[in-house]
Image: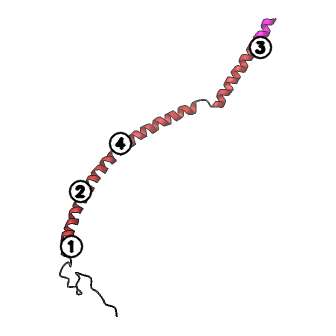
Amino acid sequence: MVEVLRFPGRSGAQSGGGPEDPMLESRVAGIEDDMKDVKASLRSIEIILAKIEGRLSGLEGRLTGIEGRLSGIDARFSSLPTTWTMLTIIFATWGIGSGILIFALNVLRK
């Protein structure tokens, strides 16, 4: 047969007369004090988060203004001629200038 050993400090019968560990009450009191500190910390964190939220809502308005200005810049860039348009204008100007120069040289020779 196996010998059953009882855990030290525990009686076999459950009487319901209170905690079996006399240190339990002091430990619970320590935990309650710690929870008061945790609650105080949470309150301060909530205050800080409310301040951050206020700053972010102000920042949102500023970002909307910046977005409007950027769309204006985008409209300006879209109105600028493209690279191909610029090259076409340059080559057409050179061609016309060369034609005028050749015509002038032919007229002056005669």
> Spatial distance from mark 2 to mark 3, Cα to Cα?
91 Å
Residue 100's tag is: none
Q: Which residue bears the numbered disc 3?
A: 102
Q: In this rendering, is residue 75 above or below 58? A: above
Q: Residue at x 66, y 31 (%)?
A: 84
Q: Which residue bears the numbered disc 2?
A: 40
The verdict on residue 108 being magenta is: yes
Is tag 2's residue or tag 1's residue first in the polypeptide sequence?
A: 1
> Spatial distance from mark 3 to mark 4, Cα to Cα?
67 Å
Q: In the rendered structure, which amino acid carries the disc numbered 1?
A: Leu
Residue 58's tag is: 4
Please name whichever residue, 40 or 23, is drawn nearer the observer in this view of the structure.
23
Disc 3 or disc 1, which is closer to the eye?
A: 1
> Spatial distance from mark 2 to mark 1, Cα to Cα?
24 Å
Q: In this rendering, is residue 24 above or below 107? A: below
Is tag 3's residue or tag 4's residue first in the polypeptide sequence?
A: 4
Q: In the rendered structure, which amino acid carries the disc numbered 2?
A: Ala
Q: In the rendered structure, which amino acid carries the disc numbered 4?
A: Gly
The spot of residue 109 in percent (x, y) is 80, 6
Helix, strand or loop status at disc 1: helix
Q: In the rendered structure, which amino acid carries the disc numbered 3?
A: Ile
Q: Which residue bears the numbered disc 1?
A: 24
The spot of residue 24 in percent (x, y) is 21, 73
Q: Residue at x 26, y 52 (%)?
A: 44
